[in-house]
Amino acid sequence: MALSEKLYELRKKGGLSQEQLAEQLGVSRQAVSKWESGKAVPESDTLISISKYFNVSLDYLMKENDLVSEMVAYKEETQTKANSGREKRIFGIVICLIGIVCLLAWGIVSIFMPTTSDRIGTSSMITIDGNGVFLIICLAAIIIGAVLLLKSSSDK
């Protein structure tokens, strides 16, 4: 809220006319009118008199943002950070679970169907056999997921 709006509200709450407020502050009614319309700003000594008369701080009079809008902005910022951390945690958990499930599936295939495991190993075009590549991919997924989880918990 602007200074002009604050002055108008304070005057109205006090049940004063512009003329009455002008008398209390030792200024003209036209000066009060210009302040309330935003065409002029009171001098510093007059601002001090206004703050004392209405029992408000100079900060309240001069700052554009009031406490409510600052609280709303802080709440929105906190909510955005919380959502970002939650998304990182979920993504980290999903990546870890995919790596673990793939490792378990590969282990089951290797134990119960060794010929399938051997065929995949020999058909690989990479110099590391198929078992090694798959193991590296699964471990990388688990490590990346764990790093994301740790990072999201440290961001709090």
Image: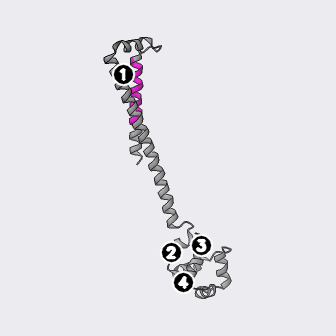
Q: Position of residue 16 (x, y in %)?
A: 58, 85
Give residue 123's quadrant in the image: top left
Q: Amino acid at mark 1?
A: Trp
Marks 3 and 1: which is nearer the front? 1
Give residue 104's quadrant in the image: top left
In the image, 120 versus 148, the foreground residue is 120
| Mark 1 neighbour density, 10 Å: few (under 14) some (14–19) many (20 or more) | some
CA separation, marks 4 and 3?
A: 16 Å
Give residue 91's quadrant in the image: top left
Magenta residues?
Answer: 131-146
Identify the disc placed on residue 106: 1
Q: Amino acid at mark 3?
A: Leu
Q: Position of residue 143 (x, y in %)?
A: 39, 32
| Mark 2 neighbour density, 10 Å: few (under 14) some (14–19) many (20 or more) | few
- Which comes before the other along the chain, label 2 or label 1? 2
Q: Is residue 143 magenta?
A: yes
Marks 2 and 3: which is nearer the front? 3
Residue underneath mark 4: 14
Q: In this rendering, is residue 106 above or below 150? A: above
Residue underneath mark 2: 57
In the image, 69 versus 108, the foreground residue is 108
Marks 2 and 1: which is nearer the front? 1
| Mark 4 neighbour density, 10 Å: few (under 14) some (14–19) many (20 or more) | few
Q: Position of residue 14 (x, y in %)?
A: 54, 83
Left or right, 107 with reference to 36: left
CA separation, marks 2 and 3?
A: 12 Å
Marks 4/3 in contact by CB < 8 Å: the verdict is no
CA separation, marks 2 and 1?
A: 70 Å
Residue underneath mark 3: 3
